[in-house]
Image: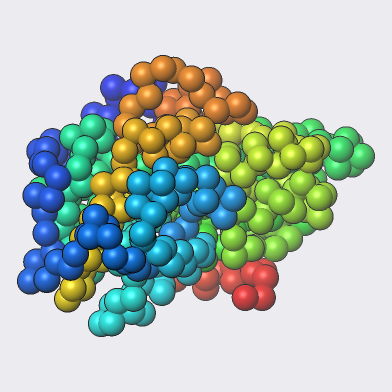
Amino acid sequence: MKKSAMMIICLLLLTALMSACGTSSSGSGSAEGANVQGGAGSGEEQELTVYTALEDDLIEEYLQSYRAKYPNVKLNIVRDSTGVITAKLLAEKDNPQADVIWGVAATSLLVLSDQNMLAPYSPEGIERIQPAFKDSTDPARWVGIDAWETAFIVNTIEMENRGLPVPRTYADLVKPEYKGLITMPNPASSGTGFLTVSGLGQLLGEKEAWNYLDKLHENIGVYTHSGSKPAKMAGTGEYPIGISFGYRGIVEKKDGSPVEVVFPGEGSGWDVEANALVQKANVKQVAKDFLDWAITDDAMMEYAKNYPITAVKNDSGALPEGYTQDPINQLIEYDLEEAAKNRDAVLEEWSSRYEGKSEAK
């Protein structure tokens, strides 16, 4: 069932995720048992290792205001799909390499938080973040920046050539006429894949969701290890229907691909792109500075150019081109904490059923 208004989604998420979150001033949180090293204002060059799952084509655009403010910080950006970044962080638990996490699924950060891998820190300006987009503890262990959602990217020329209608709903995707024409992300590799599969579980109920995914599997040509790739494959017509996410489909269309971006009629699965401070023996002040910057007005303005739902409420009402005019109402009711708790079980079950159609890693 879809939510009908912003107030409803906030109340539901507040109930499901957290109690009301208190505010805190800059630097009020610190890594427990950790030493804090000097900040970017010292004049000496500093290095910062950032793990991210943000889209490749957005990272440098987002970082322009950071580089202007902190020119003496050398950023080591490690970018990969959500599942790969999550697995990398878990593998490095006893010897963490990252200083901060930027733009990784909140469901992944909840898993890391449960393993005490995130240091408590409430960035400057956290009081501006909507409650549903941040941790309920004070200091916070994760803070969101925006939300992204499931969409179908459909090649209209290929559909016309085959005499097929554009699918509008999840129910449409399992019709026999689409057999072999669909690609979607592997949820173990891709955050988009996980939010789609997990979202169906919460939308339909566990038993019915697996029954549905069994039927969808019959129509799948390949599972990719990237949430973006199904949109790109739809753009070229290699697989004319790609289960991906809204932003990537909209970019494909802007770049001239003959695609339509369809937000499923039943509602979209979704997650929050979020940030965190990695728990380690020596926490750098520049890591805290980065998290402060990542929720500034400058950063939020950049996020809002690409995503219609941001952690700081956009009162202008302006939406990026290509999105539904009611993006909040497009989202299904979705409990991030429940999704994180069930993550391993969902991925194990999915892999046991469908891994055979995944592309080679």
Q: Position of residue 194 (x, y in %)?
A: 47, 56
Left or right of residue 202: residue 243:
right
* Count of marks overlaid on the render: 0
- Residue 262 in percent (x, y) is at 64, 34
Quarter of the image where the N terminus is located: top left
Q: Residue 230 placed where, x, y %?
A: 67, 53
Regarding residue 29, the answer to whether it shows in the image is yes
Residue 102: give x, y in percent of width and height: 37, 55
Q: Is residue 231 shown left or right of residue 342?
A: right
Asked if residue 205 can be seen in this view, the reply is no
- What residue occupies the far top of the structure in this picture? 316
For the point 55% across and 28% down, the residue is 320
The quarter holding residue 96 reads bottom left
Residue at 43%, 67% (x, y): give it. Answer: 76
The residue under the point 92% across, 39% down is: 161
In-image side of 173 versus 207 (left or right): right
Residue sitting at x 29%, y 65%: 44
Quarter of the picture containing the C terminus is: bottom right
> Depth check: 359 or 71 in front?
71
Vertical order, 171 against 77 (above or below):
above
- Seen from this angle, which residue lies furthest front? 43
In the depicted view, which residue is nearer to us: 268 or 288?
288
> Relative to 95, is 5 on the left or the right?
right
